[in-house]
Amino acid sequence: MNIDTDSLVTFLIMWGTPTTMMLITYLKMSKDDKNDVKKTFKSAHFILTLGFFVTGYFLSSLGNLLTLEIMKLIGVPLMIIAGITISVDFWKENKVKSILLPMLILVAIFAVIFG
């Protein structure tokens, strides 16, 4: 397990900044808003779309940072499942977005694998 300093700084900026901003925003919310956020995060729709994508991308980028291939192998299928679910969800709204989005997710997956 070899950690590169440049990869560590990039990882901390990429994941630390949004996490900190979300935490600060969550702490400023009212009690009703916090309950709505908890309810949304526990919904199956959120978990299968954004939840799987963010978790998969996090595991893959952590695998890149720690040079552990097994973490990439766990993260990529999660991103693929999320891509399929998001595409099916967008198919109802807009046909062009439903075709464009999987291509963008594939680019993200290739960037994680070969990046």
Image (spheres, rainbow, N blue to C red):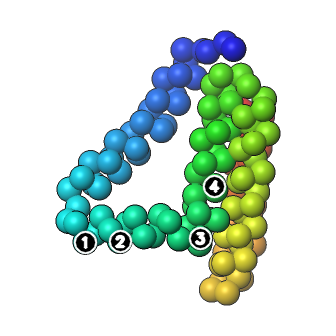
**Precedes in sequence: disc 2 or disc 4:** 2
> Marks 1 and 3, how far apart in space?
21 Å
**Is 114 located above or below residue 57 in the figure?**
above
Q: Amino acid at mark 3?
A: Ala
The mark that comes first in sequence, 1 or 3, is: 1
- Amino acid on which the number 1 mark rests in the picture: Asp
Q: Amino acid at mark 4?
A: Phe
Where is mark 4, residue-wise?
53
Element type where label 2 sits in the image? helix
Which residue corresponds to mark 1?
A: 32
Q: Nearer the viewer, residue 97 or 64?
A: 64
Place of residue 105 in the rendered image (x, y in percent of width and height, measured from the top left): 70, 56
Q: Dot 1, crowdedness within 10 Å: few (<14), some or many (≥20)?
A: few
Q: Nearer the viewer, residue 54 or 106?
A: 54
Residue at the spot of label 3 = 44
Query: Residue at left 75%, top 67%?
Result: 84
Q: Earlier in the sequence, mark 1 or mark 4?
A: 1
